[in-house]
């Protein structure tokens, strides 16, 4: 009985278990079906994602994998872009060089056979000595002491020609050489890099600048366009994967773009020739020359007095310093000396412009009906302000016309024009012509002179007077040259620039840098008038040394004070344009503190302008339009020959443009003021004799014309005399009568 109950219970229990199992199986089927679909969907999403990763970011993840595997990498350097002149001549390029690398680990573990390993080592020692001059003992020492190293640089800076014999060994079909090459080729290899090369050495050094050993541009165009010239390094990734197989992945480098500049190598050579001649014969603290195309703002040439070798920019001994001087200098002193040599005076430094500013005062007054071409001015030698401050003119000119005020550089006339303008208009004049602001030229370190120019709040009546003839405020050469271009081209102020085109590694144009019109300054009518006044200044006024036979040249002299009013330090300058009838070239010369007792002799600047134009104009196929007398042609040719001979003689005596850095006494005998005066008188007499001879020769064709020029020359004050008498002193009286409110540009800057 009891047994049956137990069996019945088991039967009932088993029946319930089967029923429960059936119910669970149906539920599980649904769940399993959902899980199955979920897994399928996840797998599909994962597959799509993996495919996306492989296609889009496969290379990145591959590199990440490599980073945790056994691999080594080799950087493939990019080639920095070239710098070319406007005709395609290479001014800067990067040439490939090689470093000789030895892998001691490979050499020492290339074979399990002891005898073969010995042959490999001996072949390595022999090859390195025979093909690269590496001492045998040095090689054996490296293979012994650095046996497990993978990278030992034996030599740097090898050229293609240096490694070519070894490359030929690797390609040799000779059995003995082939066997030797097979033993060493895996342990000796070359690492590529680039070295910046400047084929013309010092030419246009202040414009081009230079790059450091790492390829980064440090100065000039190299620095300003560093990102453009730079590229992106490539990379070779070599590694051993999980299957112990050697794998390599390469990414090619992206080379930098090249610059096509506005510089003309031949014009640059001409400019630097005459700058060097002046430095050899006389010398100065600073000499700067800018040559521009006035019709588009292109800089055709730019030079300073002291060049440096772009291939060795840190070598002070190449810039006039002796080895003893350099040895005694501290690191800070050497850095300061290098900075002075690398500075681009035409862009980085400022000065008072002097009388070269007068054309801006006159043209602004003309354009705003403050004067007219028939206007006259009474010059009695200066103007006195109500507080007793007396501002001198360089001479007592009497009654002068507006044109004669430019020709003879009359301060009195400029002061009268500035009085008519008033302070507000004069400040507007300066801003309109770009004074006190950067021009935007594509060179590093441009000075703005923003704090070295008067504002409406700081300019008083005396400052207004002195500013009208270029005293009391500072400017830069590139500011002056750009502004001058605008008044001779019809009134268009173009941004000065040194690069005209950017091209990629294949020579395709990336960007064209065309002329950029910044603003209009004066009218065409005023521009035409000032051109004629500048022409008369060269023919019959203070700029006669700039005359070039056969060409109509215009220009304006300038003399200004340097470093305060209490000394005799002077800066002379000359701005010129040619030809007058169709301006194509502007040349601006500045000579800062020449090594003469009388530093205010602006004829040196005007003569340099004329000499430069005498070669630049024919080179640009701008031909003479005026008749040239036989005597005039001979005389001018003789002048140029005499200049070359004098420079050669100075060089033979040991003079160089770098003598200013020598501890020796000045290399030019400094004449006294009286001797300078005698020299000037002699020059004037010689010039008059030459003029008389020319008059006699051309009497039939030019009767009376040259006599009139001679009379005007006798009446016009010589710019050198102007400097001797005080050189357009701003608010400076004789016997110490200086205006109480007058401050130097340095004070303004503070």
Image (cartoon, rainbow, N blue to C red):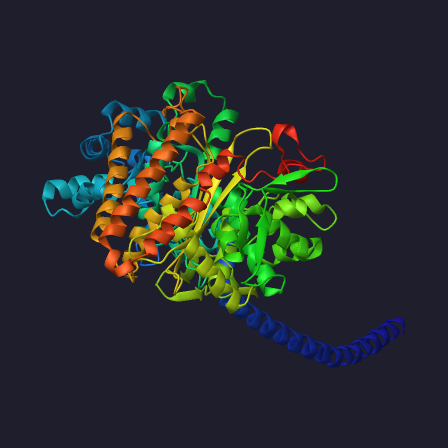
Q: Which quadrant of the structure image shows residue 655?
A: top left
Q: Position of residue 283 (x, y in %)?
A: 39, 32
Q: Position of residue 438 (x, y in %)?
A: 57, 52
The residue nearer to you, when weighing 578 against 276, is 578
The residue nearer to you, when weighing 493 against 323, is 493
Q: Which quadrant of the structure image shows residue 370?
A: bottom right
The residue nearer to you, when weighing 674 against 451, is 674
Quarter of the image that includes the C terminus? top right
Q: Residue at x 47, y 36 (%)?
A: 600
Quarter of the image that includes the N terminus? bottom right
| Residue reaching furthest to the left | 174
Q: Residue at x 55, y 71 (%)?
A: 47
Q: Is residue 746 above or below residue 49?
A: above
224 with respect to 612 (left or right): right
Is residue 76 visible in the rendered image? The answer is no
Is residue 411 visible in the rendered image? The answer is yes
34 with respect to 66 (left or right): right
Q: Position of residue 711 (x, y in %)?
A: 39, 49
User: Looking at the image, how many numbered discs can be counted on the residues?
Assistant: 0
The residue nearer to you, when weighing 172 against 178, is 172
395 with respect to 500 (left or right): right
Q: Is residue 31 above or below residue 735?
A: below
Q: Position of residue 316 (x, y in %)?
A: 40, 29
């Amino acid at each position: 009985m009891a047994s049956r109950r137990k069996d019945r219970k088991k039967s009932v229990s088993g029946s319930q278990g089967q029923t429960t199992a059936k119910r669970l199986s149906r539920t599980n089927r649904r769940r399993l079906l959902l899980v199955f679909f979920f897994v399928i969907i996840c797998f599909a999403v994962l597959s799509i994602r993996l495919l996306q990763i492989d296609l889009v970011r496969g290379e990145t993840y591959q590199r990440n994998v490599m980073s945790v595997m056994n691999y080594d990498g080799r950087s493939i350097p990019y080639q920095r872009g070239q710098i070319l002149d406007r005709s395609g001549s290479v001014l800067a390029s990067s040439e490939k060089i090689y470093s000789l690398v030895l892998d001691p680990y490979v050499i020492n573990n290339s074979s399990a056979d002891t005898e073969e390993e010995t042959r490999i080592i001996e072949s390595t020692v022999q090859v390195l000595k025979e093909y690269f001059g590496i001492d045998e003992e040095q090689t054996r020492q490296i293979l012994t002491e650095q046996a497990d190293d993978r990278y030992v640089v034996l030599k740097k800076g090898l050229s293609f020609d240096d490694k070519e014999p070894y490359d030929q060994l690797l390609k040799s079909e000779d059995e003995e050489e082939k066997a030797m090459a097979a033993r060493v080729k895996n342990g000796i290899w070359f690492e590529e890099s680039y070295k910046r090369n400047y084929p013309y050495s010092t030419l246009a050094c202040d414009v081009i600048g230079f790059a450091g050993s790492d390829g980064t541009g440090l100065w000039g165009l190299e620095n300003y366009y560093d990102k453009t010239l730079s590229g992106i390094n490539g990379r070779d990734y070599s590694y051993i994967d999980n299957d112990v197989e050697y794998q390599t992945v390469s990414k090619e480098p992206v080379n930098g773009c090249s610059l096509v500049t506005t510089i003309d190598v031949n014009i640059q050579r001409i400019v630097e020739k005459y700058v060097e001649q002046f430095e050899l014969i006389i010398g100065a603290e600073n000499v700067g020359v800018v040559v521009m195309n006035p019709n588009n703002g292109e800089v055709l040439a730019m030079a300073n007095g002291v060049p440096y070798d772009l291939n060795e920019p840190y070598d002070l001994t190449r810039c006039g310093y002796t080895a003893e001087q350099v040895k005694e200098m501290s690191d800070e002193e050497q850095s300061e000396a290098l900075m002075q040599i690398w500075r681009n005076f035409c862009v980085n430094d400022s000065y008072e412009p002097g009388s070269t500013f007068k054309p801006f005062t006159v043209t602004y007054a003309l354009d705003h009906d403050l004067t007219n071409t028939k206007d006259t001015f009474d010059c009695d030698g200066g103007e006195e302000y109500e507080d007793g401050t007396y501002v001198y003119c360089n001479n007592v000119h009497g009654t002068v016309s507006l044109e004669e005020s430019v020709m003879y550089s009359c301060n009195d006339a400029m002061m009268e024009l500035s009085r008519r303008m008033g302070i507000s208009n004069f400040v507007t004049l300066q801003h309109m012509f770009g004074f006190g602001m950067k021009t935007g030229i594509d060179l590093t370190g441009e000075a703005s002179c923003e704090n070295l120019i008067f504002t409406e709040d700081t300019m008083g009546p005396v400052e207004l007077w002195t500013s009208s003839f270029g005293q009391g405020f500072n400017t830069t050469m590139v500011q002056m040259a750009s502004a001058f271009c605008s008044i001779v081209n019809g009134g268009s102020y173009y941004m000065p620039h040194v690069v005209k085109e950017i091209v990629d590694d294949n020579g395709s144009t990336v960007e064209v840098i065309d002329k950029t019109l910044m603003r209009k300054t004066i009218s065409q009518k005023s521009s035409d008038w000032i051109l004629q006044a500048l022409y008369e200044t060269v023919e019959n006024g203070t700029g006669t040394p700039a005359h070039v036979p056969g060409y109509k040249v215009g220009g304006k002299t300038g003399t200004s004070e340097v470093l305060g009013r209490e000394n005799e330090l002077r800066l002379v300058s000359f701005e010129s344009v040619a030809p007058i009838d169709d301006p194509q070239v502007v040349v601006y010369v500045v000579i800062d503190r020449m090594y003469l007792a009388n530093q205010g002799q602006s004829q040196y600047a005007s003569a340099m302008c004329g000499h430069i134009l005498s070669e630049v104009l024919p080179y640009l196929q701008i031909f003479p339009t005026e008749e040239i007398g036989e005597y005039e042609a001979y005389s001018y040719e003789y002048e140029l020959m005499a200049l070359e001979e004098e420079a050669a003689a100075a060089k033979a005596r040991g003079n160089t443009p770098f003598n200013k850095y020598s501890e020796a006494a000045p290399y030019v005998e400094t004449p006294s003021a009286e001797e300078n005066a005698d020299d000037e008188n002699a020059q004037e007499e010689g010039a008059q004799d030459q003029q008389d001879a020319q008059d006699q020769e051309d009497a039939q064709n030019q009767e009376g014309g040259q006599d009139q020029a001679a009379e005007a020359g006798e009446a016009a004050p010589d710019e050198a005399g102007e400097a001797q008498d005080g050189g357009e002193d701003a608010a400076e009286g004789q016997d110490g009568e200086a205006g109480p409110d007058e401050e130097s540009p340095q004070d303004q800057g503070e």
